[in-house]
Amino acid sequence: MKAVAVFPEKGKVRVIEVESPRIETPTQVKLRMVEVGICGTDREISTFLYGSPPPGSESLIIGHESLGEVVEVGAAVCRVDPGDLVVVTVRRPCPHAGCMACRSGRQDFCYTGDFTERGIKGAHGFMTEFVVDDEVYVNLVPRELRDVAVLVEPLTIAEKAIIQLWQVQQRLPWACPIVPGKEPGYCHKAVVLGAGPIGLLGAMAFLINGFETYLYSLEPPTAPQAAFARLIGATYIWSMADSPQRLAERVGNIDLVYEATGAAQVSFEVMKVLGTNGIFIFTGVPGRKGPIELDADQIMRGLVLKNQVIFGTVNAGRDAYEAAIHDLALFKRRWPNAVQSLINGRYPIEAASDILLGKPKGIKSVIAFDWKK
């Protein structure tokens, strides 16, 4: 079967032929991959900034944003059947008995760092024609989401952040008064930093939860991202025209900042205007760049005097995948055109190298294994 692989030692990215995997245990399922999304992580792996092959292999099959169809199941599989559509989780637990997170099935909070991640760290990914995995890692997707289900994995980043947000803010009187017909976040204001796929999906998730939502981004007001924000009912603010201080003046008390840029400078500038009892969520991972100037005194004063919280979040567990599948269905009903517009193009596997190494086009490019001209 065909697969897209990186060869870190050789500095190459190419389509290769590999043996099709087989079911080896009673709880495994075999999937025919339908679509795999391409994201910034895939592009960085393809330029060899990070990414590690499985032990004993010189190559790593990439791809972690998956949509597959079950074609075969082991004798003990009970959660899915042949013909079902599924999305597969990315991270696998570390082997250490003392890691409470991994032993509890929450490897997204692994203590040791010895986890593996399919398509990223120590395990082959999903940009290939067939995949075998244990049923515990597959998540059933309704067939009516077939055209957008490849967005589930990137949406899980926001869903995990929202789950943690509600848990953390139980520390204070933060919940909105219950009003029939109102979503739980209706009394709060959220600012999303960045208008890439993670930011746009995050904005939709916050809107579904009732937050008054603002997108603060580098792209000009004429960009497709700004039009997308208007289409879903978010307010778009151009960072080149409005400073973080001006952002705060326009928004008022900023209850939540969801960072989706990986840009440290702008993130910490916005942190200075985070509101009273506010929470700042980091999801981006900056590249290795030079030091930045930081007004640490102002940030520290805000954290203490305004009862603020900062946390980072990475990867996701089953709860976030289930929430993403549920919310994606809501997105599709509420904003059908907007959700579709996130996927700018579907391409055959033979085009993967050009997409990975070329300049990004649109918002989300997808490798489609049933691609037709």
Image (cartoon, rainbow, N blue to C red):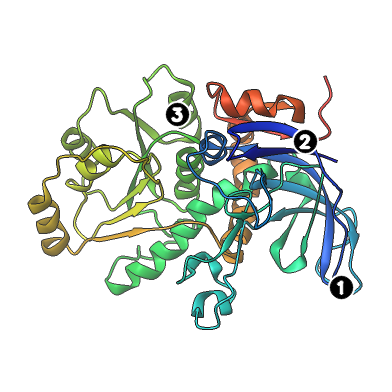
Q: Quadrant of residue 308?
A: bottom left
Left or right of 207? Residue 28 is: right
Left or right of 3? Residue 303 is: left
Sequence-wise first label, 2 or 3:
2
On the question of residue 118 being in view, the answer is yes
Hey, what amino acid is under mark 1?
Answer: Pro
Q: Quadrant of the C terminus?
A: top right
Q: Which mark is residue 230?
A: 3
Assess disc 2: are there few (<14), some (14-19) or many (≥20) residues with their C-alpha within 10 Å of its C-alpha: some
Residue at 47% in and 45% down: 202
From this view, report whether residue 138 is shown above or below residue 189: below
Assess disc 3: are there few (<14), some (14-19) or many (≥20) residues with their C-alpha within 10 Å of its C-alpha: some
Q: Nearer the viewer, mark 2 or mark 3?
A: 2
Distance of mark 1 from mark 2, alpha carbons?
29 Å
SS state under label 1: loop
On the question of residue 348 being in view, the answer is no
Hey, what amino acid is under mark 2?
Answer: Ile
Determine which residue is flagged by label 2.
Answer: 16
Distance of mark 2 from mark 3, alpha carbons?
42 Å
Determine which residue is flagged by label 1.
Answer: 26
Residue 103 percent location from the top left of the image: 57, 79
Spot the residue most to the top: 222
Left or right of 86? Residue 277 is: left
